[in-house]
Image: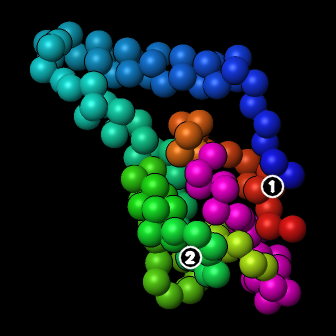
Amino acid sequence: MRLKLTSNQVLANVLGVLIKIHGLFFKDPTNLGCQEVGTLLRKIRTQILWGCTLFFKDVENDVAVVRSRAEAMGATCKTLMDSTVTHLVTSNKTMEDFRWAEQVDSRYLVHPRWINAAHYLWHKQPEEMYFTL
């Protein structure tokens, strides 16, 4: 299932980010003018996938770009599959992947579009919307 957004939904996401920046900028009145908006944007971005540990397997296209986006959003990316992995990111699912995800409730099998959507929409997306079917 692909997420289709209207222009109103995109504008609502942008407004939410701007409100967060405004709140962070004026949080400390003694620091006015000393904070860069770019720094605040990076701070917001690093919280999007905070707590997610990803392993990439059989990702089509440019895995380096997807991995870089995930890390910029606060995710930890692993080179070896271990018990700390919460999200298996793959373009080509297998029965083994489904079994892995079903073993523990907090494990997810997602398509790389899940990372790209979070990157563009500035918030973590529901994993079930990007389940690899």
Residue at image coords 27%, 31%: 38
Question: Residue 55 has which mark?
Answer: 2
Residue 26 appears left or right of 77: left
Q: Rounded to the nearest whole Å, what is the CA distance between mark 1 and mark 2? A: 17 Å
Residues 110 and 51: in front is 110
SS class, disc 2: strand
Q: Which residues are magenta?
A: 94-117
Label 2 packing within 10 angstroms: few (<14), some (14-19), many (20+): many
Q: Are marks 1 and 2 in contact (CB under 8 Å)?
A: no
The image quadrant where one finds the C terminus is: bottom right
Residue 64 badge = none
Residue 57 in the image: x percent, y percent?
62, 81
Between 23 and 128, which is closer to the camera in this rendering?
A: 128
Q: How is the image coloured?
A: rainbow
Dot 1 corresponds to which residue? 128
In the structure shown, which secondary structural element does the residue marked by tag 1 occupy? helix
Q: Is residue 39 above or below residue 36?
A: below
Q: Is residue 20 magenta?
A: no
Residue 89, by quadrant, is bottom right
Check disc 2 and give the amino acid type: Phe
- Residue at screen point 46% across, 62% down: 65
